[in-house]
């Protein structure tokens, strides 16, 4: 949060922090001295904190509605709304505790002396909120977030004690049950503190980040800079469909990225790491270097070398025709070199139809209109798409690639980087790399061009031309390798990619166009004579034209 908090909001935030601490202090006192007066001070004082929260919300909304409010100020105001909501939630949880406690016959079953230290931790977190917010103090925010783990540990001990007592048929069953509810409320207080921490950290960084992700990032950057005090900033680059987030990391005064930070599920990040390392062993120079790797629980994070240059998508959409031609030539040479160097005479099946079957459910959820049972028009049977896939799957069983090469596995236009200064191609997002039919990468690349949601007619023609140029390159390579089933396998690969890509596209016209192409390609494959595979041709100009 680089902007100063408006004075009116800062005043109300201070009053809210004081009120929350007061409520927690009263709850803390009730455990030591359970009186009706203390219970009333908690239970009946719900309006003030809520009013303070609503004042902060109203002030933030009023300022957000101004046209001249900059993006940094907007982030600050949105974070203040969330902070005030979390603080008010702590008072709600305090009241929930009191409602349980006042109905208990005897607090002894609760072991009341164990709860004030927990509430003291919550209060220590609240005491740090104003400084963390007003001073953009990420270290204070981290201290708030770390309290959650300690509270979870203390609450687990209490819950375990109560459950053990209940199993012994304890005669204070109702009191022990209420004690469990109190423990649950305090556990939720820890979760609120963690969320407060994440809100403040996210506002400081300029993008949403959870506590675990930031700790991983901080640890990785320390490895990179050899300094705990090195300032760094991050900017979102992408979010993968598997849930991973990708950000660019800058340090010091330099705005250029020094590394790329990627985090997500440990299994996915581990696959990415293994993919990069495999490329370094099999074909050095194409994949970025891994600078650092950390794992925490079920999550993991990578710090990867930043590759200078443009993605192929950026070049295609924004750069000159000369640069596009240069990049395509370099990509063509690189791919042919990789295919030659990694060539192995082991037949392999891409199983495009199996891949398609696994994703059809997701396609139909987004586009239920694509699912039909077939029809008959003028005596001609129009097969349902599922039927076409099933029959094409049987046909594909006889269409193995005669050799295998090492492929990218997710060869989209945004996973290829070209550096015009070094005249060098690099690959990123390598978690699906393996020895496979090269047609898999060819089909994915071609369809990743088509599915770009660009309506500008000249640019659209440029996109279609690139797909056809890439096809001609791949076909020449297939001919040089006596790969007679190349076109049939490519038709199936294109059908697979056209159909499965629609699950990410809400533009009905584009999605329908892609699905019809998949339907048409499958019909072509099924109508072809397998004994004359070398004569089959994909009508490329009809497929890649709008």
Image: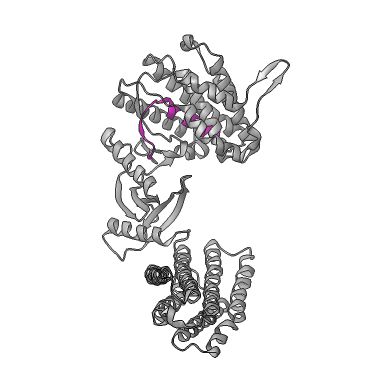
The location of residue 169, given as percent across then percent down, is 43, 71
10 vs 273, left or right, is right
- Of all residues, the one furthest to the top in this rendering is 531
Q: Is residue 264 visible?
A: yes
Given residues 57 and 419, the one toward you in this image is 57
Given residues 480 and 16, the one toward you in this image is 16
Question: Hey, which quadrant is residue 474 in on the image?
Answer: top left
The vertical placement of 486 against 232, above or below, is above
Given residues 523 and 287, the one toward you in this image is 523
At 61% from the left and 64% from the top, the residue drawn is 68
Magenta segment includes 450: yes
Magenta segment includes 95: no
The location of residue 342, given as percent across then percent down, is 30, 27
The location of residue 461, given as percent across then percent down, is 58, 29
First to last magenta residue range: 430-451
Figure colour scheme: one colour
334 vs 200, left or right, is left
295 vs 316, left or right, is left
């Amino acid at each position: 949060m680089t902007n100063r908090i408006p004075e009116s909001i800062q005043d109300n935030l201070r009053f809210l922090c004081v009120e929350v601490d007061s409520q927690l202090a009263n709850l803390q006192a009730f455990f030591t001295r359970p009186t009706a007066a203390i219970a009333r001070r908690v239970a009946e004082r719900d309006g003030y904190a809520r009013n303070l929260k609503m004042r902060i919300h109203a002030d933030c909304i009023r300022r957000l509605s101004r046209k001249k409010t900059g993006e940094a100020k907007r982030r600050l105001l949105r974070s203040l709304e969330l902070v005030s909501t979390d603080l008010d939630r702590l008072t709600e949880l305090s009241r929930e505790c009191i409602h349980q406690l006042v109905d208990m016959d005897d607090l002894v079953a609760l072991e009341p002396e164990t709860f004030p230290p927990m509430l003291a931790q919550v209060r220590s977190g609240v005491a740090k909120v104003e400084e963390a917010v007003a001073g953009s103090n990420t270290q204070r925010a981290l201290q708030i977030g770390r309290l959650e783990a300690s509270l979870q540990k203390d609450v687990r001990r209490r819950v375990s004690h109560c459950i053990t007592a209940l199993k012994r048929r304890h005669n204070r069953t109702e009191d022990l049950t209420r004690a469990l509810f109190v423990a649950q409320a305090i556990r939720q207080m820890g979760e609120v503190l963690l969320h407060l921490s994440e809100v403040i950290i996210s506002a400081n960084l300029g993008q949403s980040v959870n506590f675990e992700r930031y700790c991983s990032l901080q640890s990785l950057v320390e490895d990179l800079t050899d300094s705990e005090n090195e300032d760094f900033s991050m900017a979102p680059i992408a979010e993968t469909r598997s849930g991973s987030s990708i950000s660019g990391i800058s340090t010091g005064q330099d705005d250029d990225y020094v590394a790329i930070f990627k985090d997500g599920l440990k299994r996915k990040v581990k696959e990415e790491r293994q993919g990069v390392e495999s490329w370094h062993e099999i074909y050095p120079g194409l994949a970025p270097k891994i600078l650092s790797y950390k794992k925490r629980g079920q999550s993991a994070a990578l710090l990867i070398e930043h590759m200078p240059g443009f993605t192929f998508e950026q070049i295609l959409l924004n750069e000159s025709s000369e640069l596009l031609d240069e990049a395509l030539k370099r990509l063509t040479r690189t791919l042919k070199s990789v295919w030659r160097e990694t060539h192995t005479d082991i037949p392999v099946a891409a199983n495009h139809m199996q891949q398609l079957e696994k994703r059809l459910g997701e396609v139909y959820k987004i586009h239920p209109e694509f699912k039909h049972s077939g029809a008959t028009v003028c005596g001609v049977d129009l097969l349902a798409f599922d039927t076409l896939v099933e029959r094409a799957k049987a046909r594909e069983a006889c269409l193995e690639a005669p050799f295998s090469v090492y492929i990218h596995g997710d060869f989209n236009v945004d996973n290829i980087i070209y550096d015009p200064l070094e005249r060098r191609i690099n690959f990123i997002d390598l978690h699906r790399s393996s020895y496979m039919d090269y047609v898999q990468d060819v089909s994915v690349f071609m369809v990743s061009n088509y599915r770009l949601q660009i309506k500008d007619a000249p640019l659209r023609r440029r996109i279609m031309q690139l797909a056809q140029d890439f096809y001609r390159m791949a076909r020449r390579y297939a001919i040089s390798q006596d790969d007679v089933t190349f076109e049939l396998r490519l038709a199936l690969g294109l059908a697979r990619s056209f159909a499965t890509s629609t699950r990410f596209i809400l533009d009905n016209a584009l999605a329908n166009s892609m699905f019809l192409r998949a339907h048409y390609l499958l019909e072509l494959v099924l109508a072809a004579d397998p004994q004359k595979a070398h004569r089959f041709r994909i009508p490329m100009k009809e497929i890649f034209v709008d």
